[in-house]
Image: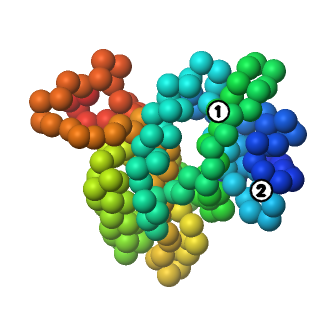
Amino acid sequence: CGGAGPVEVPGVCDVAIASGCRTTDAAGGLGGLRAAMQGSRRVALKRFWKGSRPAFLMELAALKRIDVHPNVVRLLETFSSGGASGSENVLAYEFCEDCSLGTLLVSAKREGTLLPQLLAARLMRQLLQALEHIGKCGIAHQDVKPENLLLYHVCLVESRAQLKLADFGWATVGPWCQKQALPRGGIGSLWFAPPEL
């Protein structure tokens, strides 16, 4: 969360691509992330590189199956925009004003402290509730890691924060069975993947 300030985008989000939102705050393997304004609301735009339409469609299919839940980041809108490099697909999400769990853990380590036990327990409970919810919707996230756990309203003194599961780029839509073959290229992030992958 954070990075450069948001780009002011009048009207609907698809204007963002044409009005300076092409530079990314964060880049991933399939695209980039950028903050933008939609009216008075700040949003996070996840832009998919040209040629990554299958990944865009998989993420969109997973997100469309998920009902609103307090511990899952909300998809607000989707659109395509023709850019200099061709058509780009964009997902607009609610914006995280605070940070990710990954950022919080790095900060705590740098300061030589640990997260309060009560906060860690509360965050774990919220993560399990999010995973239970998406599982009931027929979704397997497949990339649960601190950087994909967004935190809102963080207060370390009171050991509280709201956690939201984000980044459904590796998600798959069920049904699953025990004997399902593992993907050839693996799934998710290496250091957070189960050993059988």
Q: Is residue 181 above or below residue 144?
A: above
Residue matched to label 2: 38
**SS of the residue at dot 2?**
strand
Q: Is residue 150 above or below residue 78?
A: below
- Residue drawn where x is 74% and y is 32% of the image: 81
Q: Residues within 10 Å of mark 1 (few under 14, many from 20)?
A: many
Where residue 197 appears, as percent x and y from the top left, is 25, 28
Where residue 86 appears, as percent x and y from the top left, is 74, 20
- Residue drawn where x is 35% and y is 30% of the image: 187
Name which of mark 1 and mark 2 comes first in the sequence: 2
Front-lying residue, 49 or 144: 49
Q: Is residue 149 above or below residue 25?
A: below
Q: Residues within 10 Å of mark 2 (few under 14, many from 20)?
A: many
**SS of the residue at dot 1?**
strand
Where residue 141 appears, as percent x and y from the top left, is 37, 44
- Residue drawn where x is 37% and y is 71% of the image: 122
Give the residue type that dot 2 points to: Gln
Residue matched to label 1: 89
Q: Is residue 7 left or right of residue 79?
A: right
**Residue farthest to the bottom, as pictured:** 158
Give the distance between the C-alpha atoms of the residues marked 1 and 2, in whole angstroms: 17 Å
Total residue callouts? 2
Visible in this render: residue 108?
no
Q: Quadrant of residue 15?
A: top right
- Residue drawn where x is 77% and y is 56% of the image: 38
Q: Is residue 100 left or right of residue 69?
A: right
Where residue 29 appears, as percent x and y from the top left, is 55, 27
Q: Quadrant of residue 62?
A: top left
Front-lying residue, 190 or 107: 190
Give the residue type that dot 1 points to: Asn
